[in-house]
Image: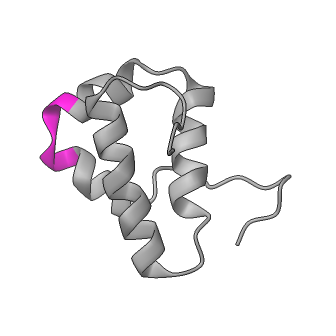
Amino acid sequence: MIKPEQTIEGIPSELQSLLEKDKEANDFFETLTKSYKKGYCDWVGSAKQEETRRSRAEKAILMLRNKQKTLKTV
């Protein structure tokens, strides 16, 4: 798990692979500012377990399809 002052470098592979398969989500992701992209990448990449990263990446794709800039996971 990353510490609060740390960030994930680049796009986590779990999220990247799903973005490559989903043009709508990827197109919206590309319109986001660096800070919004960082929020998604940090959220997905900070999970300790691979299954959690995969699950978060899938949720992120759904949120991106719904044009959500911020993480509203509730």
Q: Nearer the viewer, residue 65 or 10?
A: 65
Magenta span includes 23: yes
Q: Quadrant of the N terminus?
A: bottom right
Above or below — where is 33 with respect to 39?
above
Percent coordinates x, y for residue 58 in the rendering: 31, 56
Residue numbers of the magenta segment: 20-24
Above or below — where is 31 with respect to 22?
above
Q: Nearer the viewer, residue 74 or 21?
A: 74
Above or below — where is 25 with respect to 53?
above
Q: Residue at x 34, y 23 (%)?
A: 67
Q: Residue at x 44, y 79 (%)?
A: 50
Q: How is the image coloured?
A: one colour
Percent coordinates x, y for residue 45 in the rendering: 54, 61
- Is most of the magenta stretch helix, strand or loop? helix
Percent coordinates x, y for residue 8 in the rendering: 63, 55
Residue ranking furthest to the front: 74
Is residue 49 left or right of 60 when viewed as pictured? right
Q: Locate residue 26: give its quadrant.
A: top left
